[in-house]
Amino acid sequence: MTLALLWIMLALTACGQKPLLHSVSIVPNVISPNADGTEDVARISYSVARPARLSIYLVDAGGQRHSVRTDLDRPAGDYETLFSGVVSNRLLADGTYTCVLEARTAHGETERVEAFLTLQGGEPNLIQIKNLNIYPTTFTPNRDGINDRVTVAYHLTKEAVSVQVYLVDAAGGKYPLPEDKIRPMGAAGNHEHDYEGGVDLGATPPADGTYRVVVEAQDAVGNLDTAEGQLTIKDGGVPRMEIVNRAAQWSASVLPLGGTLTFTCTLRNIGNVAIRTKGPPPGTLYTTQENFNSKVAYEEPGIFRLGMDFEGNSSGRTYPFRWQLGADDELTTVDGQKYLLPGQTVEVVGHLKIIDKPVVVAPYYWLGLIHEQVWIVEDRVEPVPVTIGF
């Protein structure tokens, strides 16, 4: 200790100044942290006579130290800390602890005060997150119908007052997952979260990469449990496709019964993800007694096709005549699936032989861009009346 510091301390003592740390009390000094609303929390009160850094910790019967507060900046004044028995997100075991308060000024002056605090009747069951499952561990949120969604499932051993489920990227950014779809959030038991990266709402998903999946659950006492897994996102994005200029060219406005109506239109992938599609290829001829099922080109979730529909359609399905977005040699095949790449433009031609009498003499025909089992992206494009002679 320097002579100057000793002189300052002697001067303060001579002037009758209060100790650096004083008026320490713990009320009550016996708590039962079990969330029953009775003596669950101790109020640790103290006063600091001069600016100092303050720490509070408990020492158990075995001499282990449990930090409650560490190096808090405290100007001179009166303070209190509420202590629920939880340290580092876990409730301490029942027992009697030595509660230590330590204050230290920038000049090296220190003060230490000890008191006893007893925990009894604490909640014996710590909340646990068990059996965290993530499936699939790699997913492609782009609405192509293949690995578009991921399920995050786990089991809570007891009721939680707070549950958070989120992704964490390499920079620490967080992406929350939607609410549980099988049980209320926080209920004891099995839970399941369905995640599609926000693409269903038209939002851009998190960037491609590998993420930590974090589940945090806290019970009423303050116990916190955390479980983590890993998830990889790739080829993510919102599919965006258009019929260029919402335009099409029709071959005729008058046809005899048995004649063939032909259309031509141009389509473009205007998004940043590949568009999945399937046959029949452009140029395919339908009759009015057929549909895409008769071409063994069944509807499939997530694919895009160009369709034709008409006034008086009573088949029970919209756009019964559908064509692939581009010829096979214009598309890119990945794992047996055909894709139209971002920025790519194709021309589609389709034919319909009208062999059934229409319900009106000049029914309307039109085109539609269909994202199957998702939505009709562009509906009733270039409707045209065609007179059918019979």
Image (cartoon, rainbow, N blue to C red):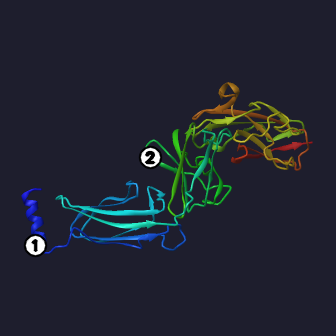
19 to the left or right of 137: left
Real-space CA distance between mark 1 and mark 2, rounded to the nearest whole angstrom: 54 Å
- Identified by mark 2, the residue type is Gly
> Which of these two is toward me, 205 or 213?
213
> Which of these two is toward me, 366 or 122?
122
- Is residue 222 something one can see in this rendering? yes
Q: To which quarter of the image does residue 76 belong?
A: bottom left
- Identified by mark 1, the residue type is Ala
Residue depicted at 48% across the width and 43% down the height: 169
Q: Which mark is residue 172?
A: 2
> Which of these two is toward me, 197 or 63?
63
> Which of these two is toward me, 290 or 131?
131
Residue depicted at 67% across the width and 42% down the height: 247
Disc 2 crowd, CA 10 A, few/some/many (<14, 14-19, 20+): few
**Residue that numbered label 1 is attached to:** 14
Question: Residue 9 location in percent, x, y?
Answer: 12, 65
Q: Secondary structure at mark 2?
A: loop
